[in-house]
Amino acid sequence: MSVGSPLKLLLGFTIPLFLGNLFQQVYSMVDTIVVGRFVGVDALAALGAVGGFSFMVVGFSIGLGNGFAVTVSQAFGAKDFKMMKKCYAMSIILSLFIGLAISIIFALLSKALLMVVKTPENILQMANDYILVIYIGLLTNIFYNLFSGILRAVGDSKSPVLFLIISSLLNVFLDLLLVLVIPMGVKGVALATVISQGISALICYFYINKKLPILKLEKEHFRVDMHLIVRLLRIGLPGALQFSVCAIGVIIVQVAINSFGSDIIAAYSVGTKIENLITQFYPALGMAISTFAAQNLGAGDLKRIKKGFRIGLAIVVVWSIISLFLAHFITTPFSYIFLDESTTDPQIIENAQIYMNTIVVFFIPLGMIFLYRTGSQGLGSGAIPMISSITELVLRTIAAFTLPVMLGYQGLCLASPVAWIGAGFLLPICYMTRMKTLRKHLMLEVD
């Protein structure tokens, strides 16, 4: 990432990640399709009702893995391979202990949390059955994101995609097995997800051990280094918590959605699944710019970092324009993939289309969030992701409690875009401030 055309490097890194993210969405999409078609609309609504809680723990896993991988990427850019191994080993230890703690806490509070957000009684038990399995199996998600993040940190964005394709196909098979053959309902699709993610994590781990000798760990690398642990937590935890803070905003919106009943919950759930498919390009670009920034920061090349961010912003604009057409043409056909056309109220499909027509107009600020927030992690900042996440939380909360009152369902659809606009235009200012700080730091080092 420190030599060659930034445009080619960013696109070459982003596209495989985008494909990988699409396959990662297969986990939740196949769950939704199988549940919506073979279990029923209430079961589909149950999955939608836990979307925020699922995003909270899965997003935490992604943020933690990416944050820890930043230190590996910086060491790789600086050619400090001994430090790389230490960062990798300490990341494994921290992921294990943090993952266990989060898993136990959320599993114990599972049903109580769903009741707090007023999940409708007719879907409460199914919602809890699904999310409880996800909480218990959280470590599989954490370690997949850690190991794939480590591979990306050293410039390999293709192998994680291949491993994810394998586990996605396995997920499809297990979904069908545990719903149609062994009628486990929503528990079955959750279990299929956890097993598939676990296998993907194991494949990543063994691949790193066999194919990347610069990351081959020995016992000495696992000696606890408190200074390094503090450094990892300073970058990894804010990255993880910023996803969780955003998820709290999503959960708050879910409270408003729940008050509209099962059909609206189902429509919103289908709409967000389609949204997640189209927008997976943005987190892929964010991971690419984070690796680009981290490696070039390790090499001390701030001018190249600035050029990378400018190119990244241009890519965001182009993809946002493409998204306008995608949302218009694919939403209704994709909605019928999730639901049985013969038994589904057409209003559910119409409401899913309304959701997509509303939010797609605001994809440029959403793309800016991923570009500057994840990119700032690569610049070693834990504060910037947290600032943007808190901004999103505050704005989404205000919008969720005011806009639906004035505009009904349309107001629900606008709650997230309001948050995107606020955070999307604040982040470039934070990024420029960070770059000034780094420039002064490097000048002092030279002096």
Image (cartoon, grey):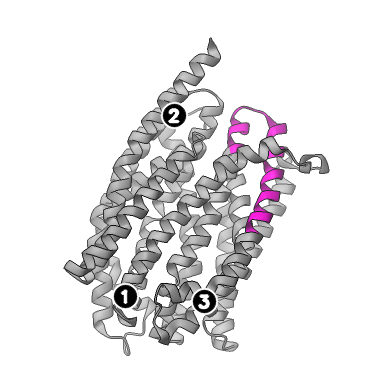
Residue bearing the label numbered 2:
305
Q: Taking 5 as reference, is 289 above or below it?
A: below
- The outermost residue toward the left is 406
Give neighbour class at mark 2: few <14, some 14-19, many 20+ (Cα, 10 Å). many
Q: Earlier in the sequence, mark 2 or mark 1?
A: 1
Between residue 390 and residue 58, name the one nearer to us.
Answer: 390
Please identify the quarter of the rendering in which residue 164 is found.
Answer: bottom right
Between residue 136 and residue 309, name the one nearer to us.
Answer: 136
Q: Residue at x 51, y 68 (%)?
A: 27
- The outermost residue toward the right is 219
Indicate left or right for 183 with 39 as reference.
right
Q: From where the camera sits, is residue 87 visible?
A: yes
Where is residue 198 drawn, in percent x and y? Answer: 65, 64
Residue bearing the label numbered 3:
111
Q: Secondary structure at mark 1?
A: helix
Between residue 334 and residue 383, name the one nearer to us.
Answer: 383
Q: Residue at x 79, y 41 (%)?
A: 223
Please identify the quarter of the rendering in which residue 183 is found.
Answer: bottom right
Give neighbour class at mark 3: few <14, some 14-19, many 20+ (Cα, 10 Å). some
Q: Which residues are magenta?
A: 71-99
Q: From where the camera sits, is residue 2 visible?
A: no
Please identify the quarter of the rendering in which residue 273 is found.
Answer: bottom left
Where is residue 233 drawn, in percent x and y? Answer: 60, 43
Q: Taking 228 as reference, is 439 above or below it?
A: above
Kind of residue indicated by mark 1 = Ala
Q: Residue at x 67, y 49 (%)?
A: 94
Q: CA distance from mark 2 to mark 1?
A: 41 Å
Residue bearing the label numbered 1:
267
